[in-house]
């Protein structure tokens, strides 16, 4: 059984794996429990989630035609 009393360092070490949902369920549950009682780690996780959402959303914005032409021109030269 995984100890559900993780330290902040352990949580931060596994933060990205946790956010990517690549942890086994016991470890993920232990981090969930830690986040319920640790405001600092919870804030860090929320910041990373919001940052990922912003990055994901920014990929949906299409570059202006002028920028696309400029990039194509640069790529054609190389």
Image: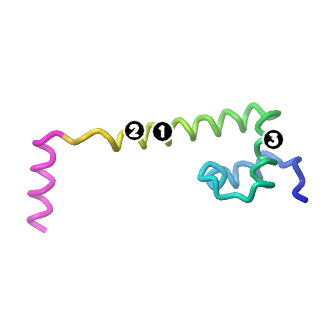
In the image, residue 31 lies at what x, y percent? 77, 46
Disc 3 on helix, strand or loop? helix
56 within the magenta span: no
Q: Which mark is residue 57?
A: 2
Q: Residue at x 87, y 49 (%)?
A: 4
Magenta: main secondary structure equals helix
What whole-number distance in Å separates the C-alpha atoms at marks 1 and 3? 23 Å
Identify the mark nearer the N-term, 1 or 3: 3
Residue 55 appears at what percent x and percent y? 42, 42
Quarter of the image that includes the N terminus:
bottom right
Q: Are the residues at dot 2 and dot 1 in contact (C-beta closer than 8 Å)?
A: yes
Question: Magenta span has 65?
Answer: yes
Q: CA distance from mark 2 to mark 3?
A: 29 Å
Q: Is residue 62 left or right of residue 68?
A: right
Residue furthest front in the image: 25
* Residue at the spot of label 3: 34
Per the rendering, the mark at residue 28 is none
Mark in front: 2 vs 3 = 2
Residue placed under numbered mark 1 in the picture: 53
Give the alpha-carbon distance from disc 2 to disc 1, as whole Å. Answer: 6 Å
């Amino acid at each position: 059984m995984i100890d559900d009393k993780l330290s902040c360092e352990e949580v931060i070490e596994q933060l990205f794996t946790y956010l990517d949902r690549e942890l086994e369920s016991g470890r993920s549950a232990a981090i969930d429990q830690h986040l319920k009682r640790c405001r600092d780690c919870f804030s860090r996780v929320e910041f990373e989630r919001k940052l990922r959402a912003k990055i994901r959303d920014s990929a949906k914005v299409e570059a202006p035609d002028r920028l696309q032409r400029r990039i194509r021109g640069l790529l054609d030269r190389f």
